[in-house]
Image (cartoon, rainbow, N blue to C red):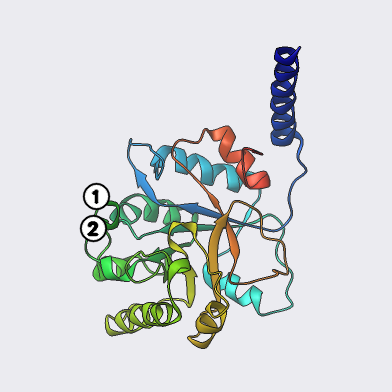
Amino acid sequence: MLLTFSIFLLLLAIWIQIATNFFTPFQKGLRVLMYHKLDASKADFLTVTIAEFEKHIDYLVDQNYHFISLSEFLELLNSKQKLPDRSVMLTFDDGYQSNFEYLLPVLKKHNLKAAVFLPVLFIGKTNTWDNESDPIMSYETLKLAQPYFEYGLHSYAHHNMAEMTKEELESDIKNCLSELKANQLQVLPVIAYPYGSYLKQDFAFEIVTKLGIRAAFRIGNKVNVFPVSNKFLLKRIDMRGTDTFGDFKTKVMKGRVKMF
């Protein structure tokens, strides 16, 4: 009897998941897609093949999605202008050299822009925070990629900003802004939180506002409804190289693939 009931619960969960993926109504709002690396053939948790990424873009174009740049998004946040239907934004974390090699040609082909969030300390170095050696774009390369790349902050040293004290958070953002200014790189006042962690401390929003930050992204895997309830807790949808193309379409429609 217990085994039969367990099987029933399992089948019910599978049915609910299938129904959710295939019959969930289209979610209105802004989809912010979060990528990291692109590669010619390699695919893993953080790396999407260029062929698969081009399928993503072709699908969004064919389905009449409206691509919003980071600068356009900031204008929409502070205006009464209506968000265009089927809006989507492309974002890439960490500023990998592979973005310059593989992403830039696709953006030029379709005349699109992507937001690239930079861990400032590692510009021109490698992703040693992951104990790996993938190259991060140099200042020279970052400037060459403008205006197709628009830049934001990803903390100074790729640290978890949710765990910072008031002093650490203020110092982190100031270090980012001062170093970027010294290297004459144009950056928008936007943060993408490393590791998807987001500010929860009582003082956090006060600090970022004081320093001129106008918006910040977590993960969340949901579509952002406009007008937004908190511009420092905007949600992004995690795009992985291990996703199927069906997963991608489901995520674009409703934010996530799995209910549980």
Q: Position of residue 168 (x, y in %)?
A: 39, 78
Q: How far apart are marks 1 and 2 (CA)?
A: 7 Å
Residue 183 sits above or below residue 250 on the image: below
Residue corresponding to mark 1? 132
Q: Regarding mark 2 in the picture, which secondary structure is present there? A: loop
Q: Residue 108 is drawn in which quadrant?
A: bottom left
- Position of residue 119 relative to residue 245, above or below, is below
Tag of residue 211: none
> Disc 2 marks which amino acid?
Thr
Question: From this viewpoint, which residue is outermost toward the bottom?
Answer: 210
Q: Nearer the viewer, residue 109 or 257?
A: 257
Question: Camera-side residue: 133 or 253?
Answer: 133
Q: Residue at x 40, y 79 (%)?
A: 173
Q: Do the residues labelled 1 and 2 touch (CB within 8 Å)?
A: yes
Viewport quadrant of the C terminus: top right
Q: What residue type is labelled 1?
A: Glu
In the image, residue 207 above or below residue 2? below
- Residue sitting at 41 percent across and 41 percent down? 45
Location of the N terminus by quadrant is top right
User: Disc 1 on helix, strand or loop?
Assistant: loop
- Of all residues, the one furthest to the front in this rendering is 2
Q: Earlier in the sequence, mark 1 or mark 2?
A: 2
Residue 79, image x and y in percent? 69, 79
Q: Name the residue under label 2.
A: 126
Residue 216 lies, in percent from the top left, at 54, 70
| Residue ID at (37%, 37%) | 43
Q: Badge 2: how crowded within 10 Å, few (<14), some, or many (20+)?
A: many
